Each structure stands twice: as C-alpha cells, then as structure tokens.
Amino acid sequence: MKTHTEQEVRNFSQISNSSLYSLETVKGFINHTVLPEKRQHLLMLLSLFSTRAGTFALTGHFDEFKNLSLADKEKIFINWKNSYLPQLRLIYKLFHSLSCHPVYATHSEALGPAMHYSNLIDAKYDNVPERLHMLKPEEITDNMSFDVVVVGSGAGGGKKNK
C-alpha cells in the first residue's frame, strides 16, 4: 500500500470545508435533489436545533446546538450513530450523507488524489464479453425458451437501444 509523503499530508491539511465552499455545495444538493415536502421536514428538524428545548430533546444538552463546543457536537453525532433509537441513527445518517457525499462528488479532483484514490471512469477493461441486446416485442416468438429472465433494468440489467 502506498503511503502519503509529508508534503501530501501538508497539502491535504490545507483543504477545508471553507476552501471547498462545502456549504454552497450542500445547499445546492438539497435544493436539486430533496423533494420540497422533505425539505420542509429537514427545515423543521434544523429549527429544533435553534431552540434550547429542541436541542435538549435531541442531545440532552440544555444550551442551543450552535453554542455547544465542537467536542460536544462530535460526541452527540457519535452517540446518534450508535444509538439504539432508529430515529437518532437516521438523523446521523442524514447529516453524514448531506455533508460528505455531495462534497466529495463535487470536489473529487481535490480530495481523490489526497487519499490516493484514482478515478477509474476512463479505465479500459480487457476481455469483457459483449452485452446481449434487449429483445424488442417484434423479436419475441411463441416457441422461445429462456434459462433466465431479467425483470427490470438496474445497474447492469438493461441498455437503451438507439
């Protein structure tokens, strides 16, 4: 396994959420992918953190979430992640997904090399069998038999005929 050089670690440590404009990335992701009624639920959840009662109900702390120390916030997130209450685990997953995935996807050019991850989009593979075409309705006859029938077209099931 390749290790990082001191200079690579120094370069990576210079990357911050602010330098990547992560807040704008996350807001754009939410506005483009989260349905309006679900955005209302998210706003309601976030508004709970701006009150002492809401913060206490979700964290056990008497102060508003914004006033808690970074160490306390980190403990809260870890507690949510490991909670026996599915609702708290769901809050953890929500914040984790909204904060990590869109930022990494948008800034993979900066973050990928720092983690020694090379993007394989342009990779060429050898010995890949040719994909079978999907049958058109006019190609189906009464006497056909099949070993397998694929219903649906998930990640590998179908291809659009041109």
Image (cartoon, rainbow, N blue to C red):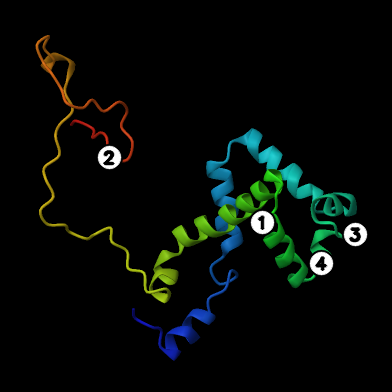
* Residue 62 numbered tag: 3
Q: Secondary structure at mark 4?
A: loop
Q: Which residue is under mark 1?
A: 82
Residue lying at 32% horizontally and 68% vertically, measured from the top left:
118
Tell me the crowding category of disc 4: few under 14, some 14 to 19, or many 20 or more residues within 10 angstroms, Cα based: some
Q: Which residue is under mark 2?
A: 156
Q: Which residue is under mark 4?
A: 68
Q: Position of residue 159 (x, y in %)?
A: 23, 35
As drawn, is 108 to the left or to the right of 146? Answer: right
Res 142 → quadrant: top left
Residue lying at 21% horizontally and 27% vertically, measured from the top left:
148
Earlier in the chain: of badge 2 and badge 3, it is 3
Earlier in the chain: of badge 1 and badge 4, it is 4
Earlier in the chain: of badge 2 and badge 4, it is 4
* Residue 144 numbered tag: none
Mark 2 or mark 4, whichever is nearer to me: 2
Q: Position of residue 54 (x, y in %)?
A: 84, 49
